[in-house]
């Protein structure tokens, strides 16, 4: 199983993240009329032998006015671009339609399916998005020629500047993939936590980093830095403070509290540098606010 494929699939199974992908990166007017509150990843249990679910694709069912539309997302992380991607996507969709008919025998028309290819690779996307470009034009078949096009979202086509202007979970994901900079990601994660109402979506994003660190795709220290930022914003009073209280008790029991003082000071300096609230830093580090003020003065240029 490809870690990136399955990780992305889990991310975009979240409604908030899915909605951000479409509203931010799919420049189609009809997107703004979708009912994202009722959208859901397709339950694949009804699918028979034609359509085969993979770790790298996802289908959403979304209400559009008085009817349903399906959004098909194919996640592509191959090191080389598949020139026949248009054919692959078309094959997935026609197989989906075959199974749709099996399970909806009285249907008069097939539902609309919007195909998205989400590309994460490092090389430029060079494959045609239109099937017609893959088919010989001789003889000229005119109206009888096959034609089909998918919507491409290539992460590496967005500049760091453009992504920093968007500032949502998906743009931060693209930023991490195409313009990895831990210092920038720390700031953006802090912004996400402050501005994003769906904390579960932010947690999924952080968990994605945890999986990358676990599998050696990024430095474990990078993940720990991002987790530190995340925890401080909401969970510190219910989780981190509790853990530190237990830690302090253990220090007192073992007579080791004095030896940890230097580490607490360094932690306090890092939190002060990020502009965290003085009272909260004192609560976490168990350092008096007067000492924190001295440390803060020492940080000033």
Image (spheres, grey):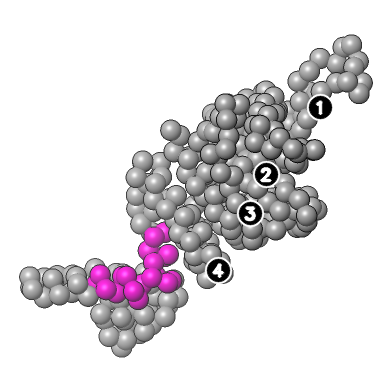
The numbered mark, 3 or 2, whose residue comes first in the sequence reads 3
**Farthest residue in the bottom direction?**
290
CA distance for labels 3 and 4: 18 Å
Please give the residue where the numbered disc 3 appears in the rendered image: 39
| Viewer-closest of 280 and 6 | 6
State the mark number for residue 147.
1
**Farthest residue in the top direction?**
139
Q: Is residue 158 magenta?
A: no
The numbered mark, 3 or 4, whose residue comes first in the sequence reads 3
In the image, the segment drawn in magenta is 226-244
Mark 3 residue element: strand
CA distance for labels 1 and 2: 19 Å
Residue 301 image offset from top left, x and y in percent: 44, 75
What residue sits 13% from the left and 71% below the top?
Answer: 250
What residue sits 39% from the left and 75% below the top?
Answer: 272
The numbered mark, 2 or 4, whose residue comes first in the sequence reads 2
Check if mark 1's residue and mark 2's residue have beta carbons within 8 Å. no
Label 2 or label 4, whichever lies nearer to me, is: 2
Please give the residue where the numbered disc 2 appears in the rendered image: 71
Please give the residue where the numbered disc 4 appears in the rendered image: 197
Residue 284 image offset from top left, x and y in percent: 30, 76
State the mark number for residue 89.
none
- How would you rate the neighbour count of disc 4 (Cα within 10 Å): few for under 14, some for 14-19, many for 20 or more? few
Label 3 or label 1, whichever lies nearer to me, is: 3
Label 1 or label 2, whichever lies nearer to me, is: 2
Mark 1 residue element: loop
């Amino acid at each position: 199983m490809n870690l990136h494929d399955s990780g992305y699939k889990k991310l975009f199974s979240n409604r908030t993240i899915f909605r951000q992908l479409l509203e931010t990166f799919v420049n189609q007017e009809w997107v703004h009329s979708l009912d994202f509150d009722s959208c859901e990843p397709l339950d694949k249990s009804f699918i028979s032998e034609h359509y085969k679910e993979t770790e790298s694709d996802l289908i959403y069912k979304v209400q559009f006015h008085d009817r349903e539309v399906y959004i098909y997302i194919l996640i592509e992380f191959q090191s080389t671009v598949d020139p026949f991607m248009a054919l692959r996507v078309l094959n997935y969709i026609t197989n989906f339609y075959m199974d749709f008919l099996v399970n909806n025998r009285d249907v008069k028309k097939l539902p609309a399916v919007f195909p998205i290819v989400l590309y994460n690779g490092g090389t430029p996307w060079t494959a045609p998005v239109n099937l017609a470009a893959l088919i010989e034009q001789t003889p000229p078949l005119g109206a009888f020629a096959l034609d089909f096009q998918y919507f491409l979202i290539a992460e590496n086509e967005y500049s760091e500047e453009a992504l920093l202007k968007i500032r949502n979970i998906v743009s931060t994901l693209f930023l991490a993939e195409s313009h990895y900079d831990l210092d920038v990601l720390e700031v953006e994660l802090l912004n996400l936590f402050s501005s994003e109402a769906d904390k579960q979506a932010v947690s999924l994003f952080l968990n994605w980093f945890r999986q990358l660190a676990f599998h050696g795709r990024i430095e474990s220290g990078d993940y720990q830095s991002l987790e530190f930022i995340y925890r401080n914003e909401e969970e510190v009073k219910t989780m981190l403070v509790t853990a530190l209280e237990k830690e302090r008790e253990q220090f007192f029991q073992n007579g080791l509290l004095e030896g940890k003082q230097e580490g607490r000071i360094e932690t306090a300096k890092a939190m002060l540098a990020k502009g965290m609230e003085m009272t909260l830093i004192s609560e976490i580090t168990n350092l008096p606010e007067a000492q924190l003020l001295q440390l803060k003065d020492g940080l000033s240029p």
